[in-house]
Image (cartoon, rainbow, N blue to C red):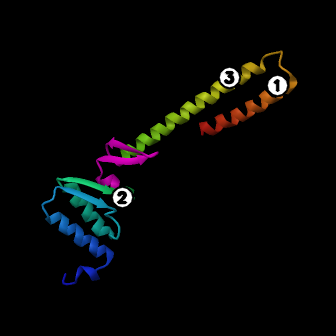
Amino acid sequence: MHKKVSVLSGGERVKVSLAKLFVSDCNTLILDEPTNFLDVYALEALEDLLKEYEGTILFVSHDRQFISSIATKILAFHERQLEFFEGSYPEYEKRDLEKERDLDAELLMAVELEITSVLSELSDPTITLEEKERLEAKFQKLLQEKRTLEH
């Protein structure tokens, strides 16, 4: 308590900075990796304080548990675009999984359509032996792709 801030450890400096913020009259907090250097007890205390904070909090963190506990809206950079999501981090992740599942379903449907097309071509009695071998190889490759997408 009687030490100069310059001699404090990283975690102690973070705690001092956060204490100064919470006793100030500001209504917006901008925090860059606020969980760095914090022990478990300080992290829990910070989460509790931020949950009760009535102002706006904008923070950057790689701590997914912290984000899940605090965030109510997500701003994320995705493919060089800023993406806004209204909801919690678990909801954001779930949405991404659903998008991925939809994409897998679309790919599976495309492969199944291509299989149908190859089977149609294979049933043509006028195809050459060379063409038939090429189509059978393509058919086997498509079946393997389909199995991969189904699992």
Height in image: 29 above or below 5? above
Q: Is residue 61 magenta?
A: no
CA distance separating discs 1 and 2:
56 Å
Residue 122 location (% of width, % of height): 77, 21
Q: Earlier in the sequence, mark 3 or mark 1?
A: 3
**Residue at 25% from the left image edge and 65% from the top image edge:** 45
Q: Which residue is mark 3?
A: 116
Q: Residue at x 63, y 24 (%)?
A: 113
Ranked by sequence position, the earlier of labels 1 and 2 is: 2
Circles 3 and 2: CB atoms closer than 8 Å: no
Label 3 to label 2: alpha-carbon separation: 48 Å
Q: Which mark is residue 61?
A: 2
Q: Which residues are magenta?
A: 67-89
Q: For the view shown, which residue lies furthest in the front direction?
A: 80
Q: Quadrant of residue 24?
A: bottom left
Q: In which quadrant is the C terminus drawn?
A: top right
Question: How many C-alpha atoms fall within 10 Å of the one at disc 2: few (<14), some, or many (≥20)?
Answer: some
Residue labelled with disc 1: 132
Left or right position of 11 against 105: left
Residue 147 coordinates in the image, percent (x, y): 65, 36
Observer-nearest residue: 5 or 114?
5
What SS does tag 3 mark? helix
